[in-house]
Each structure stands twice: as C-alpha cells, then as structure tokens.
C-alpha cells in the first residue's frame, strides 16, 4: 500500500453501511510493518451527506426564487421605466405631443418620468399656442388679401370688419372710413350676430385722433364718447379695440372690435394693428382709384361734350363743301378744286376722329349701345369686301375671304361688328406692301366663331404688340406716321368685341405680317342655310354687284 485508503462499504443499506480506512504502519527502515484499519458505521455520515444535499437543493431553490423576484423587481424599477421613457420619446419624436409616460416609482427614474411628462405638457401647450397663432396669421393673410383684392370701398369695409372679428374674436366688429373731403368717419360696415342699423354713424376724426394718437388701443367703456364713438355705449362689450386706418399720417378710418377685457390678449392686439396697416393701404388705394375714376369720368364727359359740339359744325362744313363741289352754279379752276378736295379730306378725317373719340368715351363710360340680334358673320364680311377698293391703297392689294359654307350665326350688333371688321381690314391694307395680299378667314369652333384678318405687311414688334390695343397707341416708326391715323381704332375694336363678351388678340413678328383674331359666341339654334363654300374675291363680288345693279337698271 502506498498510503492511506478509505472506502464506504454497503452504501445501499444505510443500516449496514461502514466506512473503512486502512493505513500502513511504516517501520524505521522504511518498510511496512503493519496496518491500521479503522472501521466505522457510515449511517450517520450518509445522513449528514443527505442532509447536506437537501440543504444545497433548498439553497438553490431559494436562490432561484430570489433571483427571479430580484430580476422582476429590477425590471419593474429600472428596465420598464426606461422602456416607457423611450416609448414616450419616440411618440414625441413622431409628433404626438399628447404622449405621457407612466411613472410610479419614487426613485430617480420616476423623477425623470415626471419631468418628461412636464416637458411634454409644456410642449403640447406651446404647440397649441403656436397653432393658434399660425391660424391667426393665416386668417390675417387671407383676409388681408381679400381686402386688397377689391377697390370698392363698401366691399372692402365689409371684408375688413369680418376679418377683424375673426382675428380678435370680439362680439362685434366695425370698419369705418371717411370720404376724401369728410371730416368724420361716416361710411361703416359691421360684422356680428343679428342686425344693427349703422346708418348715420358719425365719428369726428379729430376726437378719434386725440384719443388714439395714431396707435391701436384698447378703450374702456368710459372712453368711448371721448373717442367719438358714443354709439358703442348701447352695444354689449365693455372694451373696444380701436385701430386707426392711416396713410402718410392722415387718418382714413378706423377698425373697432367690441368685447370683454379677457378677449383681447396682447397677440390679438398686435395682429389687429398689423391688419389695420393692410386695410389702411387698401383703403388708400380705393381712394386713389376713386379719384382716378372721377378724373377719368370728367375727362370722358368733357371729350363727349366737346366732340358733340365739334361734330355739328363739322357736319355743316362737310355738307357745304359737298354743295360747293357738286353745284353747277359754281365754277372753279383746277387749283381751287384741289383746295376744296383738301378741305373735304381734312373735314372727313376730323369727323372720323370725333366719331372715334365719342366711341372711346362711350366704351370707357360703359355706355356703348349694342343692339344684339342674330347676325351672320359671312354676310358682314361679304359687305365689307364691297368697300375695300375705296380704301386708300385698297386697289393695289389683293383681298380674299375664306368663308365656311354654313352661315356663322352670332348674337351681335351688325353695325358694331362691321366697324371692327372695317378697322382690321383697313389696317391690314394700310400696313401692307404694294401688291400684298390680305386674307379674311372665318372659322367655326365648338362654342364660338373666329375671324382672322391676316396681312403680309411689315409686322409688329413684340413690345408694340402688347400695347396696340391701348388708347392712342401707335407704333413709333416712319411707316405709321406716313399712314396717319388716330391710334384709337384697335381700342374701339377691343371695346366693341368685349362688349359682345368676345376676345380680340393679335399675332405678329417684324417682317412676318400680322394676324388679328376676334371671336364671338355662336348662336347654337341659328338657322342653317345652304351656301357655296370657297374663296370669294373682291373682284367676283364687285362683278356680281355690277350684274345685279345692271339687272335692276334694265327692270327700271
Ligand atoms: P391707327 O391705325 O389709327 O393708328 P389703330 O388703333 O387701328 O390706330 O392701330 C394702332 C397701331 O397698331 C397702328 O398705328 C399701327 O402702328 C399698328 N397696327 C395696327 N394694325 C396693324 C397691321 N395690320 N400691321 C402693322 N401694324 C399695325
């Protein structure tokens, strides 16, 4: 035996189980001289081992339970609040400012959750305020543009009173303005529930200026009378937000919102001041517009009266000259005849000018009389072609009309549409080169007929093209000066076509001729007659006219 050995025997039977330990006894010379054998009953030992085993299992189980409970508690106190915070942050990041976290713990994480909720609440409140301010700014912009979109003062004041109420939220709102020569605000508009007679409201501007001193102010009830607003004492509302309408240090009117003190917060007051500035500019524009309109009206009236006065003596001169030329009682030398012809030509030009000026005045005053009746554009164009050769330069130009077979029926004043056609054709001939060609086309579209007068003349530069329909506009070149004219023809054409609810426009480029178009709504139920489609030339029309008059002469 090299050393001590021990063994438990009969371990399966705790009654008989023994523990045996054997150890050699070593003699002085190193050899084994005997054995020590110790044998013990192992029952107690086994019981102790079992006990130890049970105790270890119990400790393990208790440890397991403790660790589960501990991990639960840890998740409850640490992980869950952190997850909850993360969820809250995520919701806020996605724009849900109503997100809140559940924070029950009393530790630092609980405090963090509480702080998070406070932050989210104040974010939500400031977002709501921001939204409200944005909505007010949008309203300010919308109403401001609406106010500026009209130059009619009553409509402007109505929009302004509605806008002020939407911006300030008062019970009632008023917008008042004064006329150019007024010393008090007399023209009022109101927005609010129910009806109110504001006829006769009169606020002296001096009182208003004394109290407001050019600023937007919140007036208490006891200041209403001093500001020239005693009529507001009968209205509900203890406070009046008053914003003066001013342009260049001149008061033009006032905006007033009535309500309780709490209704008017500082932002509302600043917005009202801003709104008043927009309305002031618009009221200023409306006043200027009214002044321009008044000047224009008196100019048109003057032109109309002057033209009437000039027309009578001109007509007398014309008929006298005609008599002088045609009467066999008078005899003239060639020079005298030429002088009379010059006079006749000048008188005719003056009569045309007066007629044009009268037409323009009527168009501008909106009193151009239009006698609507079913009219065939084909007939009008054909009639026009008869006098083409009489136009200055008309003989050297080929004029051609392309008309559809069916009559192009429109509801129009034939005299006025003839005037348009004559003007466009005369211009086309006037600005054509000798030997050029003028074409008149008539096209049918779904809802309208279009007339196109084209020439192969010098054309019109883009800068002039956008101006030629204006009054007295003539292209500044020698060719135009040579031709003479008043610069009123196209303005009159535009006025006439627009009075027919039609459209007139021109296409041209320098050196490329010009095309003048106008369209008129078609009469859908107009009778459709048969007519030969094709090209009608002036010559063919003249010859048919000659044949017709010759036949008439034979009959006579
Ligand atoms: P007017 O012919 O009496 O001058 P209009 O109003 O009829 O007045 O025409 C205005 C100007 O437009 C003319 O002076 C001319 O410069 C230009 N214009 C009009 N029609 C034509 C055309 N067919 N070709 C070139 N220029 C034209």
Image (cartoon, rainbow, N blue to C red):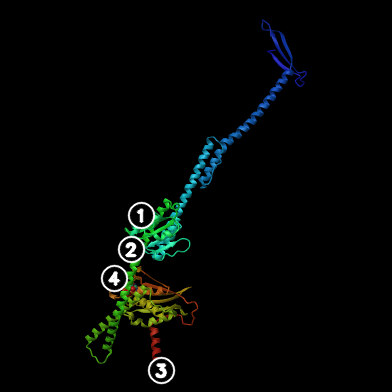
Q: Earlier in the sequence, mark 3 or mark 2?
A: 2
| Residue with the mark numbered 4 | 477
Q: Secondary structure at mark 1?
A: loop
Residue at disc 3, CB closer than 8 Å to ligand 1: no
Q: Count residues near mark 4 (Cα–Cα under 10 Å), then give few for <14, some for 14-19, many for 20+.
A: few
Distance CA(mark 4)–CA(mark 2) = 52 Å
| Residue with the mark numbered 3 | 555
> For this rendering, which residue is in front, 484 or 191?
191
Q: Count residues near mark 2 (Cα–Cα under 10 Å), then give few for <14, some for 14-19, many for 20+.
A: some
Q: Earlier in the sequence, mark 2 or mark 1?
A: 2
Closest to the camera, between mark 3 and mark 2, is 2
Distance CA(mark 4)–CA(mark 3) = 53 Å
Image coordinates for residue 113, horizontal then vertical, percent: 53, 39
Which mark is on residue 215? 1
Q: Quadrant of the N terminus?
A: top right
Tell whether label 3 touches label 1 (CB within 8 Å).
no
Which mark is on residue 183? 2
Image coordinates for residue 153, horizontal then vertical, percent: 39, 65
Residue at disc 4, CB closer than 8 Å to ligand 1: yes
Tell whether label 2 touches label 4 (CB within 8 Å).
no
Q: Is residue 75 above or below residue 184?
A: above
Q: Count residues near mark 1 (Cα–Cα under 10 Å), then give few for <14, some for 14-19, many for 20+.
A: some
Q: Is residue 73 above or below residue 454?
A: above
């Amino acid at each position: 035996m090299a050393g001590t050995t021990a063994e438990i025997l009969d371990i399966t039977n705790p009654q008989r189980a023994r523990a045996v330990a054997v150890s050699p006894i070593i003699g002085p010379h190193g050899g084994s001289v005997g054995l020590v054998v110790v044998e013990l009953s192992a029952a107690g030992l086994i019981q102790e081992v079992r006990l130890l085993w049970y105790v270890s299992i119990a400790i393990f189980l208790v440890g397991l339970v403790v660790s589960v409970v501990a991990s639960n508690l840890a998740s409850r106190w640490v992980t869950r609040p952190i997850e909850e915070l993360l969820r809250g942050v995520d919701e806020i990041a996605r724009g849900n400012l109503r997100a809140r976290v559940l924070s029950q713990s009393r530790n630092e994480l609980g405090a963090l959750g509480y702080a998070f909720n406070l932050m989210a609440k104040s974010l939500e409140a400031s977002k709501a305020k921001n939204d409200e301010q944005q909505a007010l700014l949008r309203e300010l912009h919308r109403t401001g543009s609406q106010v500026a979109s009209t130059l009619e003062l009553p409509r402007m004041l109505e929009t302004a009173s509605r806008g002020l109420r939407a911006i300030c939220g008062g019970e009632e709102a008023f917008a008042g303005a004064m006329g150019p020569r007024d010393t008090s605000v007399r023209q009022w508009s109101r927005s609010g529930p129910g009806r109110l007679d504001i006829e006769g409201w009169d606020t002296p501007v001096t009182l208003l200026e004394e109290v407001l001193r050019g600023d937007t102010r919140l007036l208490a009830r006891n200041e209403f009378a001093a500001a020239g607003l005693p009529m507001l004492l009968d209205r509900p509302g203890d406070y009046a937000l008053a914003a003066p309408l001013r342009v260049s240090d001149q008061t033009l009117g006032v905006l007033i919102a009535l309500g309780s003190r709490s209704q008017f917060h500082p932002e509302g007051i600043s917005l009202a001041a801003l709104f008043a500035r927009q309305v002031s500019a618009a009221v200023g524009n409306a006043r200027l517009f009214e002044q321009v309109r008044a000047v224009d009206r008196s100019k048109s009236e003057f032109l109309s009266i002057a033209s009437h006065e000039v027309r009578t003596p001109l007509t007398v001169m014309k008929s006298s000259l005609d008599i002088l030329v045609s009467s066999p009682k008078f005899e003239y030398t060639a020079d005298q005849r030429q002088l009379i012809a010059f006079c006749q030509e000048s008188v005719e030009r003056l009569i045309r000018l007066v007629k044009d000026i009268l037409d323009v005045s009527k168009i501008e005053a909106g009193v151009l009389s239009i006698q609507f009746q079913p009219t065939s554009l084909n007939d009008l164009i054909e009639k026009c072609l008869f006098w083409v050769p009489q136009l200055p330069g008309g003989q050297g130009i080929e004029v051609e009309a392309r008309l559809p077979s069916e009559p192009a029926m429109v509801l129009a004043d034939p005299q006025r549409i003839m005037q348009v056609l004559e003007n466009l054709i005369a211009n086309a001939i006037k600005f054509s080169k000798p030997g050029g060609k003028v074409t008149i086309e008539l096209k049918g579209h779904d809802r309208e007929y279009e007339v196109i007068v084209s020439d192969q003349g010098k054309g019109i530069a883009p800068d002039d093209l956008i101006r030629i329909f204006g009054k007295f506009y003539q292209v500044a070149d020698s060719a135009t000066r040579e031709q003479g004219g008043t610069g009123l023809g196209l303005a009159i054409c535009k006025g006439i076509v627009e009075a027919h609810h039609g459209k007139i426009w021109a296409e041209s480029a320098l050196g490329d001729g010009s095309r003048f178009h106008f369209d008129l709504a078609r009469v859908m139920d107009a009778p459709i007659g048969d007519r030969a489609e094709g090209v009608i030339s002036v010559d063919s029309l003249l010859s048919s006219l000659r044949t017709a008059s010759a036949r008439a002469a034979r009959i006579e």
